[in-house]
């Protein structure tokens, strides 16, 4: 049975009557042709479901139903010069169903999202970009592509914590949150160990919350070769050793939970998350 996983209430000032969904490989745009006003403050109700939801009921007038592919599963509703808050709808690189409704008084919009299927393709979604002036990447290798169900992903699991209304209290109770952001909690419902990576050690400016990536860091060398903090273990590789500084340059596969005060909050990737990165590395050996 379909159930709603999370929701978000939002207000945006709409210009020229259009509302867009940002955070996908395309940006669907919605417009209410029956509404005469082109500039107005819209009240938005966003809902994430685990399957196609039931009919919205007679108080809602349907505008459109379509599908789109989400990059990381975190989207924003937007207008021409502004966008709303981040909203987690589900796992990354899934095809989603989306319906848009307006209430019968034309004062509120309802957007409902649900995952349909895994569409991850390393030939499309994680193709390497060659440095300027260098040769293009070599021909890809054909390797088996992992296929997941939406229920495997953290974003679709019941959240472990019920968040109080106070953001400050949330941050005190759940130190793994970024500035009290519930998305970082939803992406880590099993309370796996989290760790922070300083911005200067790894540049993730082109990475987004909810995505899974290989990440590098320098670590203190230990007798058993394991990292001191017990993290960065998924897909772990030791690339270099610095015998004079007794350090190693190691990499692992992590899921990005958010950014905070010049650091990136991450956790080790789960097996199905890491499988996509490993698949892309086999596909593009360079």
Image (cartoon, rainbow, N blue to C red):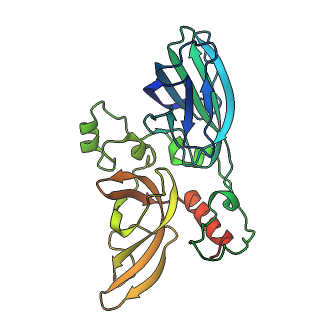
Question: Can the viewer see residue 193?
Answer: no
Q: Residue furthest bottom?
A: 244
Quadrant assignment for the N terminus: top right
Of residues 138 and 283, the one nearer the viewer is 138
Residue 204 point in image, percent of width and height: 44, 61
Residue 175 point in image, percent of width and height: 29, 49
- Tell me: 23 left or right of 97: left
Of residues 154 and 129, the one nearer the viewer is 129
Of residues 147 and 43, the one nearer the viewer is 43
Identify the image quadrant of residue 67: top right
Question: Can the viewer see residue 85?
Answer: yes
Residue 61 point in image, percent of width and height: 62, 14
Residue 155 point in image, percent of width and height: 51, 44
Identify the image quadrant of residue 170: top left
- Tell me: 45 left or right of 185: right
- Tell me: 196 left or right of 91: left
Q: Residue at x 36, y 52 (%)?
A: 259
Compared to 30, does 21 lie above or below? below
How many numbered circles are shown?
A: 0
Q: Residue at x 43, y 68 (%)?
A: 232
Q: Residue furthest right?
A: 142
Quadrant assignment for the C terminus: bottom right
Of residues 9 and 276, the one nearer the viewer is 9
């Amino acid at each position: 049975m379909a159930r709603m996983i999370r929701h978000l209430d939002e207000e945006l000032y709409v210009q020229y009557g259009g509302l867009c969904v940002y955070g996908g490989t395309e940006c669907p745009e919605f417009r209410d042709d029956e509404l005469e006003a082109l500039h107005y403050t819209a009240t938005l109700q966003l809902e994430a479901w685990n399957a196609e939801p039931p009919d919205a009921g007679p108080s809602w007038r349907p505008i459109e139903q379509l599908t789109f592919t989400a990059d990381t599963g975190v989207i924003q509703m937007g207008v021409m010069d502004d966008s709303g808050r981040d909203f987690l709808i589900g796992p990354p690189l899934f095809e989603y169903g989306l319906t848009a409704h307006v209430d019968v008084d034309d004062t509120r919009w309802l957007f409902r999202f649900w995952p349909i299927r895994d569409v991850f393709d390393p030939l499309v979604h994680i193709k390497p970009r060659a440095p300027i002036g260098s040769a293009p990447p070599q021909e890809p290798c054909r390797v088996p592509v992992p296929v997941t169900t939406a229920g495997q992903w953290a974003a679709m699991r019941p959240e472990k914590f019920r968040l109080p209304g106070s953001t400050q209290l949330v941050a005190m109770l759940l130190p793994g949150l970024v500035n009290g952001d519930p998305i970082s909690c939803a992406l880590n419902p099993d309370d796996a160990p989290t760790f922070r990576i300083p911005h200067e050690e790894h540049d993730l400016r082109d990475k987004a919350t909810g995505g899974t990536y290989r990440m590098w860091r320098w670590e203190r060398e230990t007798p058993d070769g394991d990292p001191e903090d017990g993290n960065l273990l998924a897909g772990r590789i030791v690339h270099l050793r610095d015998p004079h500084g007794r350090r190693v340059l190691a990499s692992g596969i992590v899921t990005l939970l958010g950014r905070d005060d010049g650091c990136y909050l991450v956790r080790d990737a789960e097996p199905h998350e890491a499988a996509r990165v490993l698949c892309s590395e086999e596909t593009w050996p360079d």
